[in-house]
Image: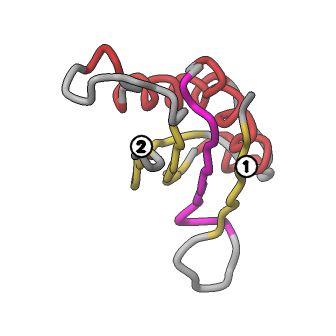
Amino acid sequence: MKTAGDYFIEINGLKLYGYHGVFEEENRLGQEFEINLLIKIDPDNKGDFDHPETVVSYAEVITQVKEIFSRSCYKLLEKLAQSILRGLESFPQIQYAKITLRKPSPPIPEHLDSVGVIMDFHYQ
């Protein structure tokens, strides 16, 4: 008997403006952040993949991420990433999630593309 392979949702390049950071000017002026998510869905989810009500909605995940992102001002990217991952627990079909959270314009003098954190979480 054949079984279905793994099922992932991928959200890349979600750009949000926020007031997170250690420095006062980051909290006052804000800056852009970029979020990438890789989400593994329970393989026992027997949803019909052509009916939106039977799968995890990209839009609902993004809404949840945006709500968590704007709920508080976090000093560290690590805490923000952890809060987003924990917030995804509200989707019972999610088994695993990995987040890449980037700050494209960090307030440091070196020239670079971004700084960030990568964190994952196993649910259940």
> Which mark is on residue 110?
none
Q: Which residue is labeled 1 in the image?
A: 21
The residue under label 1 is which amino acid type?
Answer: Gly
Q: Judge whether residue 74 can be spotted in this image.
A: yes
108 magenta-colored: no
Q: Which residue is labeled 2 in the image?
A: 1
Give the residue displayed 67% in from the left and 36% down from the top: 85
Query: Does the residue at mark 2 contact the one at mark 1 (Cβ under 8 Å)?
Result: no
- Residue 96: where, in percent of width, then height? 63, 41
Q: Judge whether residue 14 can be spotted in this image.
A: no
- Residue 48: where, in percent of width, then height? 27, 24
The residue under label 2 is which amino acid type?
Answer: Met
Q: Nearer the viewer, residue 119 or 25?
A: 119
104 magenta-colored: yes
Which quadrant is the C terminus positioned in? Answer: top right
Instruction: Please tell me whether the stretch drawn in magenta is mainly helix, strand or loop.
Output: strand
- Outermost residue, top side: 53
Which quadrant is the N terminus positioned in? Answer: top left
Q: Nearer the viewer, residue 122 or 109?
A: 122
Q: In this picture, which residue range is highlighted in magenta?
A: 93-107
Residue 108 lies in quadrant: bottom right
Secondary-structure class at tag 1: loop
